[in-house]
Image (spheres, rainbow, N blue to C red):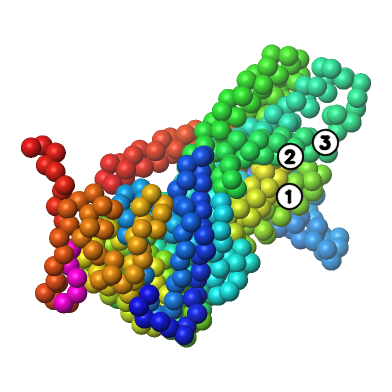
Amino acid sequence: MTTPTAMPALLQASDLHFTISGRSLISGLHLDLEPGKVTTILGPNGAGTSTFLKLLCRQLKPTRGEVTFDGRPLGDWSLREMARRRAVLPQHSSVPFDFTSLEIVLLGRSPYGDGVRHLAMARKAMEWTECAHLADRVARTLSGGELQRVNLARILVQLNLGEDLEPSVLFLDEPVSSQDPAHQHGALQVSREMARRGVAVLVILHDLNLAAQYSDSILILKQGHLIAHGTPSEVLRPELIGSVFDVRATLGVNPITQGPAVFVEPTHDRFG
Amino acid sequence: MDLRTVMRRLRTPFLFLLGGVLGVVALVSLTQGAVDIPVADTLAILRAHLPGGGEATLGPEAAAHESVLWHLRLPRLLFGIIVGAALSVSGALMQGLFRNPLADPGLIGVSSGAALGAVTIIILGGHFFPGVSWLSDIRFLPAAAFVGAFLVTIAIQRIASSGGYTAVATLLLAGVAMNSIVGALIGLATFLATDVQLRTLSFWTLGSLGGATWETLGLALPFCIGLLIIAPFFASALNAMSLGEAEAEHLGFSVERTKRVLIVITAAGVGVCVAFTGMIGFIGLVVPHLIRLCIGPDHRWLIPGSALGGALLLVMADTTARTIVAPAEMPIGILTAAFGGPFFLFMLLSQRRRALWG
């Protein structure tokens, strides 16, 4: 918002609405995703963040409004074309058969057909997401966090690790939900690196401070409405955070990044 | 390097090995039966029938065996090969489609639908329209089974799909319901049947390759070959679908198109198999599972592996069924169920243990 750029938006959503059985989950959302930027969506549980992401990646069809990618409506793209320029990390995943982690990562190369380059790229991606040591393990036996890192490696190779690529989009639905602190930062460093390589990154997070530390801009949703949109320091205001998340919020300074840091406590003691 | 990694490197040799074993077992199967035919005679007879084989010189004994071999055993062997391959590839496809190693064409009601189609024709033909000869025409039977399999599959898809997506749990439960409805209708047919029809009906429920002739082989072949040729084109899509339907779409595969094509070719293949051989259960469940254990779940190898393994298993089972109580023969469905049932329970138990371990 604050940094005007000549680069046109790669993915645009205008006036998106989504209603299911009379309940409005998303109302009138707008979004512009630019190459090279990390955009984060925050919102309390049930705010519609995952639904919003599904609308943006064509998994759900909006009741009203339109999403365009590189100037063309999503519906005009073939699935294969889209898969080479847009990758999605699901919030949950499971694998019913005994695929190894490496085989899962290699599935990320399926939009490109067979090729020898795939294996080296897969191993590199697994190093990026710190799961190279799990390559020969059966994915079904991994912990939730380990499987999440394997899947992250899979969508990185789907976008060629961000190399010689047409402008692309990476969607991450809670990529740090099952990760320990080191791997939370690891996953977000990877998304920053992808942004540095020119990819537009959209992340759903719940941790306000991780969002503050890694995002170029933040959207805050509540009950399907856009509440705020701007840089971390514009958006992370105590009264706004307090009302959206139903907490008492205090703003401080992150001693490491010198950026904003948010501290929250409950509005009242439910057991007092 | 562990055993799994080694076996996955050896996927292609493994397929050639399976093919080689199938060849040997097929040859042995031709020599075995109520009459034993020496291998040398078997080969001589086969060579005589090859184009360009001309009038090879067969000894008097070999000449006597020629009719048994050429008119009974060879079509039956080939039938066993294509039916075994078609059933187990159908199983592999359904398991990939439903993301569940327990899925099977029998499970979602395709086999039952085919049997119902065929049984309806047998009973209606004799009971209500005894004078209508075309009803008992052999070419009409697979058509009826095919229609039955199709209608059941489409009905189940209608029940289980909404908004362009198929809910797998609903699909499997709809299959359970469909199986019991079909069971009731087949029971009713049994109740109405004459003694002669009962014998034919028991053939459906038990399954047998005894009806194999060059004619039935010719009718079944196009469907089974079609299935075996089309299935590998969807191997990559099925691999991606193991991650989930949405994930497969994000990787560039049309899930709905994959489902539509695979359900149609499976219904066609299974329908034709059931029409001519009855209900041979568990092949589609057991074979893909064993192949996955050996060379992993990648459908690019699983599909050809299942085809070869299914053919091998059914030929071995049929040879056993023909010889174990010779000169009588045991319905092959009894054999496959006797081994397949406990195997299914074993798989259930290991899945439950897996679920407990998380």
Mark closest to the chain's N terminus, 3 or 2: 3
Chain letter for mark 3: B
Identify the residue under disc 2: B146
Q: Is residue A158 left or right of residue A146?
A: right
Instruction: Using the image, tell me which numbered label, if any, was put on residue B76.
Output: none
Q: Residues within 10 Å of mark 1 (few under 14, many from 20)?
A: many
Identify the residue under disc 3: B140
Q: In the structure shown, which secondary structural element does the residue marked by tag 2 occupy?
A: helix
- Nearest the viewer among B253 and A198 is A198
User: Residue shown at 63%/32% (left/top)?
Assistant: B112
Q: Where's residue B294, x and y in %?
A: 43, 57
Tag in front: 1 or 2: 2
Residue type at the position of mark 2? Phe
Q: Residues within 10 Å of mark 3 (few under 14, many from 20)?
A: some
Q: Residue furthest front?
A: A239
Identify the residue under disc 1: B223
Q: Is residue A226 left or right of residue B235?
A: left
- Residue B149 occupies which quadrant of the picture? top right
Look at the picture and state if A97 lies above or below B332.
below
